[in-house]
Image: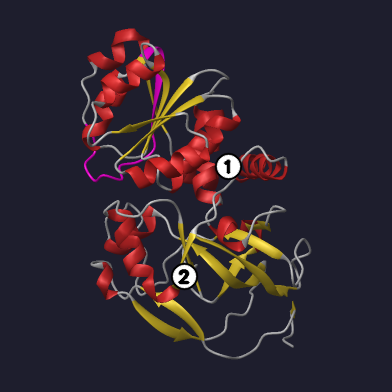
């Protein structure tokens, strides 16, 4: 036992993915690090699954606005079991199943996390689902309930519908009563979106996105969720009807789209920027309220996070590469 904490700390090396310098992902290495001990306000989590997100790969490559000092352990999302608790933490106990957003450091077998970033795993979710839950579902729920409002019966077009945020957006849209059109680059991704509740699909590498979306929706969609960018953004914007809302979440295809401003003026369309992460850090109370709503939706059976594919910790670079080149469908987590 260690003084100043609850729970046993076993002094054995902990494997972690380490980014020695920002650049190509093939530079990532697996290292053994000392067993973490919780500092003030922290808990140690025995990690069972680690969420992998598109942004993780960008950060490792130095292509994101946040550039951590190296060497560092990537990964911002995890789920596991609390194994040690600092004495000044009262809301968490050893043995609890928890999930957390921790900024960096998740790609390790054990992680010390600030307790304010840790919450219980909703009943019915496995560790993999929980590790892949917070970022994707918070982004989708923030988009459709804070940045705009999606109403029952509206047509919702989701680009990149077979990825993590895309599948969450389909699930949330269905929960809100929208009629969801899933647009993605492969049959496998579209099948995943249909399984999540999409009622129509568009293979936008082979079909005309604007024309098909208008045909399906009877003249135009009400809301677009765009986490893809590139050459798909403009036709999706043109597919919105009068007073349509176009939500910009990210640019997974690489290029940042340029759209003619007259297409925003026409039909009184609105373009909405979505940055859940920045908002969450600036409004801790508001973000906790949002997370509480999501947990209630899971426990009430209104949203249904998919069971992700599991890959070993040593494949972190390969998984991030697959997210960056959009070859992976669905959600993937790393496991120790």
The reply to whether residue 318 is in sight is yes
Residue 243, magenta (yes or no): yes
User: For this view, does 81 lie left or right of residue 271?
Assistant: right
Percent x, y of residue 276? 48, 41
Please identify, in this view, whether the residue under mark 1 or under mark 2 is nearer the observer.
Answer: 2
Residue 226 lies, in percent from the top left, at 36, 34
Marking on residue 283: 1
**How far across and down, in percent of the image, does residue 29 sit?**
34, 79
Percent of width and height locating residue 44: 64, 73
- For label 1, the crowd category at 10 Å Cα-Cα, with few meaning under 14, some 14 to 19 and many 20 or more, is few
The image shows residue 119, relative to residue 143, as above or below, that is below
Whether residue 67 appears in this view of the structure is no
Q: Residue at x 45, y 86 (%)?
A: 32
Is 119 on the left-hand or right-hand side of 101?
Answer: right
Front in this rendered view, residue 87 or 229: 229
Between 94 and 322, the residue placed more toward the observer is 322
* Magenta run includes residue 336: no
Q: How many marks?
A: 2
When the figure is inspected, residue 202 is found, relative to residue 116, above or below; the finding is above
Q: Quadrant of the N terminus?
A: bottom right
Q: Secondary structure at mark 2?
A: loop
Tell me the distance, in whole angstroms, between the alpha carbons under discs 1 and 2: 26 Å
Pointer 2 residue: 107
In the image, the segment drawn in magenta is 241-257
Instruction: Give the residue displayed 54% in from the left and 55% down from the top.
Output: 307
- Give the class, few, some or many, for how many residues have Cα within 10 Å of label 2's Cα (few <14, many ≥20): many
């Amino acid at each position: 036992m260690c003084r100043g904490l609850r729970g046993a700390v076993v002094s054995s090396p902990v494997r972690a993915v380490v980014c020695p310098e920002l650049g190509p992902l093939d530079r990532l290495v697996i290292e053994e690090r000392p067993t973490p001990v919780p500092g003030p306000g922290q808990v140690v989590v025995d990690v069972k699954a680690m969420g992998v997100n598109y942004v993780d790969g960008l950060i490792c490559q130095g292509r994101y606005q946040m550039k951590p000092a190296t060497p560092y352990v990537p990964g911002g999302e995890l789920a596991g079991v609390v194994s040690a608790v600092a004495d000044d933490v009262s809301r968490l106990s050893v043995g609890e199943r928890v999930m957390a957003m921790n900024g960096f450091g998740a790609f390790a077998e054990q992680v010390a996390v600030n307790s304010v970033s840790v919450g219980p795993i909703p009943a019915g979710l496995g560790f993999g689902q929980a590790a892949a839950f917070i970022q994707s579902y918070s982004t989708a729920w923030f988009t459709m309930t804070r940045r705009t409002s999606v109403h029952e019966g509206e047509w919702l077009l989701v680009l990149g519908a077979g990825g993590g945020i895309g599948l969450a957006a389909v699930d949330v849209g269905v929960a809100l009563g929208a009629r969801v059109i899933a647009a993605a680059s492969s049959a496998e991704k579209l099948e995943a979106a249909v399984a999540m509740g999409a009622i129509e699909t568009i293979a936008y590498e082979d079909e005309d996105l604007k024309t098909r979306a208008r045909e399906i929706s009877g003249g135009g969609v009400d809301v677009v969720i765009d986490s893809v960018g590139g050459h798909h953004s403009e036709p999706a914007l043109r597919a919105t009807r009068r007073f349509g809302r176009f939500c910009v979440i990210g640019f997974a295809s690489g290029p940042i789209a340029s759209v003619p401003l007259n297409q925003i003026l026409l039909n009184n369309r609105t373009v909405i920027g979505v940055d859940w992460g920045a908002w969450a850090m600036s409004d801790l109370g508001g973000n906790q309220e949002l997370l509480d709503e999501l947990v209630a939706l899971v426990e009430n059976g209104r949203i249904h996070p998919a069971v992700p594919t599991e890959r070993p910790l040593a494949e972190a670079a390969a998984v991030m590469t697959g997210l960056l080149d959009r070859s992976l469908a669905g959600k993937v987590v790393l496991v120790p």
